[in-house]
C-alpha cells in the first residue's frame, strides 16, 4: 500500500529525489556560496548572475530534501539544461575530436551524470501534476 503523502510515488523514488537534492545542495551550494563569499572586487554582471542562479538553485534544493515532490520543477530544469548543453556544446566538440582538449571537458564530467535525475524523476507523477494539468483548463 502506498503512502497517501507521496500520491502514489514509490518510496524509493522519494529517497532517490532526496539524495539528488542533497547532492545539489552540498556540491552546487559549496561551489556557488564559496565563490560568492570569497569574491574580491567588482562583479562582472554576467558572472554575478550565474553565481546568483546557482546559489538560488542550491537553496531550492535544500527545500526539496523536505518536500521532494513540490520541487520537481528544479529536477526538470537540471535534466533540461544539462541535456541541452551536452547536445549543443559537448556533442559537436566530441564529433570534431576536440572535446578532450577543450575548456568544456570538466563540465562534461559533471553534466554526464544527467541519468541520475532522469532515474530519480517520478515521470508518471510529473506528467500528471505538471503537464496534464493544462488539459483541464
Image (cartoon, rainbow, N blue to C red):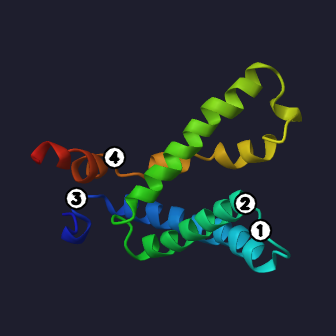
Q: Please report contact status of discs 3 and 1: CB closer than 8 Å, yes or no.
A: no
Q: Position of residue 119 (x, y in %)?
A: 46, 47
Residue at 14% across, 42% down: 135
Q: Position of residue 21 (x, y in %)?
A: 51, 66
Q: What's the distance in space between the residues labelled 2 and 4, CA to CA?
A: 33 Å
Q: Is residue 104 left or right of residue 88?
A: right
- Whether residue 135 can be seen here: yes
Q: What's the distance in space between the residues labelled 3 and 1, CA to CA?
A: 46 Å
Q: Name the residue under label 3.
A: 8
* Mark 3 nearby-residue class (10 Å; few <14, some 14–19, many ≥20): few
The image's mark for residue 137 is none
Kind of element beneath mark 3: loop
Q: In this view, does 69 lie to the left or right of 44?
A: left
Kind of element beneath mark 4: helix
- Whether residue 120 can be seen here: no
Q: What's the distance in space between the residues labelled 2 and 3, CA to CA?
A: 41 Å
Residue at 73% across, 60% down: 47
The quarter of the picture where residue 35 lies is: bottom right
Amino acid at each position: 500500500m502506498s503512502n497517501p503523502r507521496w500520491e502514489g510515488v514509490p518510496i524509493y523514488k522519494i529517497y532517490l529525489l532526496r539524495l539528488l537534492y542533497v547532492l545539489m545542495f552540498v556540491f552546487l551550494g559549496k561551489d556557488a556560496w564559496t565563490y560568492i563569499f570569497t569574491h574580491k572586487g567588482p562583479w562582472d554582471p554576467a558572472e554575478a548572475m550565474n553565481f546568483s542562479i546557482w546559489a538560488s538553485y542550491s537553496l531550492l534544493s535544500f527545500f526539496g530534501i523536505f518536500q521532494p515532490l513540490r520541487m520537481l520543477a528544479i529536477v526538470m530544469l537540471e535534466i533540461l539544461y544539462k541535456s541541452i548543453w551536452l547536445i549543443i556544446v559537448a556533442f559537436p566538440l566530441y564529433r570534431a575530436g576536440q572535446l578532450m582538449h577543450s575548456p568544456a571537458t570538466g563540465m562534461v564530467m559533471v553534466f554526464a551524470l544527467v541519468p541520475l535525475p532522469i532515474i530519480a524523476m517520478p515521470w508518471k507523477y510529473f506528467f500528471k501534476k505538471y503537464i496534464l494539468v493544462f488539459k483541464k483548463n
